[in-house]
Image: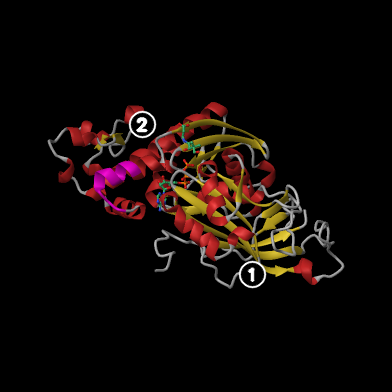
């Protein structure tokens, strides 16, 4: 049997044969493991003899625009409960050779792989035992912020607003990026006020997050996978279960306090009033009510934090979002409604990979990738393909060039 058969989703099937792999980084969360690695398609350093040396990659190319390396950043994810699939994926592609070597002493070299998320502690022994690698743990909040900041700075089309079913990509002025609120919706939710590159504080969080949606949703609908639950929610009608303002108010708006008749007055509120049992409701209606309840709640708490700290921009990440129209719509409406249009909810194209990208960015400068002849100077800047069109592009991998800093 193909050991990768049960892999839930490899969203980084390379489009071309993999070149040298440099630097693998992991974010091992409560629900999902995120994997990021870079494959080189053109390595100019090695082509230009005499111009580079093993210890001096920075500043090799005099021109501002000449990339040192060209390749792709690849992204993949696995359910944490199926961690063996992830180990098999890494092993079969030899990705674990893309860390860096730490010379403790001559007899005992360590192959270190950058990793973040709670699982970097929990599964350290397993990675050592199965792949012979040591996880070099990076703080989760540091990585989330580093990943978000990198994406917002490196890509013109990373952040977008979502309103009336449409994405609108937002150009972020690099000199005006801070401050912002980063809301990462994973199993649980972290809210981080970011004031500068290394200046941030986790100001809040909530335990009602993506894990709550998936956990409650599974129990209430009996569905077998997260994607099935999402699919159900698309087909549902939350008004069957949610009590709307109009249900309470004889079909009318409550204009005096700014509530339209279609506003949800009480999530799941109808379920108490009409003598129905769980099985009398359609799973799709339950799924949609649940999704709206949790998304709205997170949007509202985010707004309150943004208000408290005077922040106008809120970036949402984490795999709960997963590009889902209802999720993004509900969060956007909540932020817009409660802030009276003052604050903006924005979403990130690589929403679930912030931590893994941050871990990737944390490799030390000028360390040789294991088994490789080239170096990636991680102080260097990464840039996207200039022809990159976010509406056509996929999220599985992205063209990436590395420039001298
Ligand atoms: N295939 C999937 N299986 C399980 N959950 C999924 C899946 N796809 C998306 N999700 C959603 O994404 C959430 C996990 O998101 P993410 O990977 O960002 O967090 P995490 O790192 O696992 O959590 P934490 O940071 O709290 O440890 C789940 O709780 C669920 O709502
Ligand atoms: C515990 C983490 C940070 C995951 O490591 C995340 O699941 C989270 O932010 N949970 C919310 C915890 C709280 O602040 O209530």
| Local crowd size for mark 1, using a 10 Å CA cut-off: few (<14), some (14–19), many (≥20) | some
Asked whether residue 339 is in view, the answer is no
Residue at (72, 52) in percent of width and height = 107
Q: Which residue is mark 2?
A: 258
- Name the side, left or right, on which 278 lies relative to 175: left
Residue at (54, 46) in percent of width and height = 125
Query: Residue 239 in the image: x percent, y percent?
Result: 24, 43
The numbered mark, 1 or 2, whose residue comes first in the sequence reads 1
State yes or no: Cβ of the residue under disc 2 lies below 8 Å from any atom of ligand 2: no
Residue at (28, 37) in percent of width and height = 261
242, above or below 325, in the image:
above
Name the magenta segment's main secondary structure: helix
Query: Residue 275 in the image: x percent, y percent?
Result: 12, 36
Of residues 165 and 178, the one nearer the viewer is 178
In the current view of this chain or complex, which residue is farthest to the left? Answer: 275
Q: How many tags in the picture?
A: 2
Residue range corresponding to the magenta coloring: 215-224
Query: Residue 124 in the image: x percent, y percent?
Result: 55, 46
Q: Does 216 appear in magenta?
A: yes
Residue 355's disc is none
Of residues 314 and 106, the one nearer the viewer is 106
Residue at (83, 63) in percent of width and height = 52
Query: Residue 104 in the image: x percent, y percent?
Result: 73, 47
**Closer mark to the observer between disc 1 and disc 2:** 1
Residue 19's disc is 1
Q: Quadrant of the N terminus?
A: bottom left
How far apart are the two marked residues, 1 and 2, measured between alpha carbons?
Answer: 58 Å
* SS for dot 1: loop
- Name the side, left or right, on which 367 lies relative to 1: right
Of residues 44 and 292, the one nearer the viewer is 44
């Amino acid at each position: 049997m193909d050991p990768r058969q049960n892999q839930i989703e490899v969203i980084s099937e390379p489009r071309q044969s993999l070149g040298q792999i440099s630097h693998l980084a992991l974010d091992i969360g409560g629900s999902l493991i995120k994997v990021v690695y870079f494959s080189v398609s053109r390595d100019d350093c090695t082509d230009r003899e005499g111009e580079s040396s093993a210890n001096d990659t920075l500043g090799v190319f005099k021109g501002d625009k000449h990339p040192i390396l060209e390749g792709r950043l690849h992204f993949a994810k696995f359910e944490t409960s199926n961690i063996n699939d992830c180990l098999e994926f890494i092993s079969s592609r030899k990705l674990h050779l893309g860390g860096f070597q730490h010379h403790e002493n001559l007899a005992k070299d360590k192959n270190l792989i950058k990793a973040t998320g709670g699982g970097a502690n929990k599964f350290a022994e397993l990675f050592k035992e199965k792949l012979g690698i040591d996880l070099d743990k990076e703080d989760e909040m540091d990585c989330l912020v580093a990943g978000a900041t990198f994406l917002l700075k490196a890509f013109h089309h990373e952040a977008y607003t979502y309103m009336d079913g449409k994405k609108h990509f937002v150009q972020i002025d690099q000199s005006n990026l801070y401050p912002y609120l980063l809301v990462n919706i994973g199993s649980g939710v972290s809210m981080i006020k970011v004031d500068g590159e290394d200046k941030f504080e986790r100001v809040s969080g909530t335990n009602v997050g993506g894990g709550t949606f998936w956990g409650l949703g599974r129990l209430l609908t009996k569905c077998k996978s997260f994607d099935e639950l999402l699919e159900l929610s698309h087909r549902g009608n939350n008004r069957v279960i949610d009590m709307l303002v109009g249900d309470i108010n004889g079909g009318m708006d409550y204009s005096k306090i700014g509530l339209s008749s279609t506003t949800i007055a009480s999530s799941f509120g109808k379920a108490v009033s009409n003598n129905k049992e769980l099985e009398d409701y359609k799973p799709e209606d339950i799924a949609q009510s649940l999704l709206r309840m949790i998304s709205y709640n997170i949007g509202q708490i985010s707004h309150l934090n943004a208000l408290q700290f005077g922040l106008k921009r809120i970036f949402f990440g984490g795999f709960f979002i997963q590009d889902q129209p209802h999720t993004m719509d509900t969060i956007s409406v909540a932020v817009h409604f409660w802030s009276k249009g003052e604050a903006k909810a924005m979403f990130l194209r690589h929403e679930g990979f912030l931590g893994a990208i941050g871990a990737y960015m944390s490799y030390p400068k000028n360390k040789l990738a294991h088994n490789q002849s080239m170096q990636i100077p991680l102080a260097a800047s990464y840039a996207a393909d200039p022809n990159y069109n976010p509406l056509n592009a996929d999220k599985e991998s992205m063209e990436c060039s590395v420039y001298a800093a």
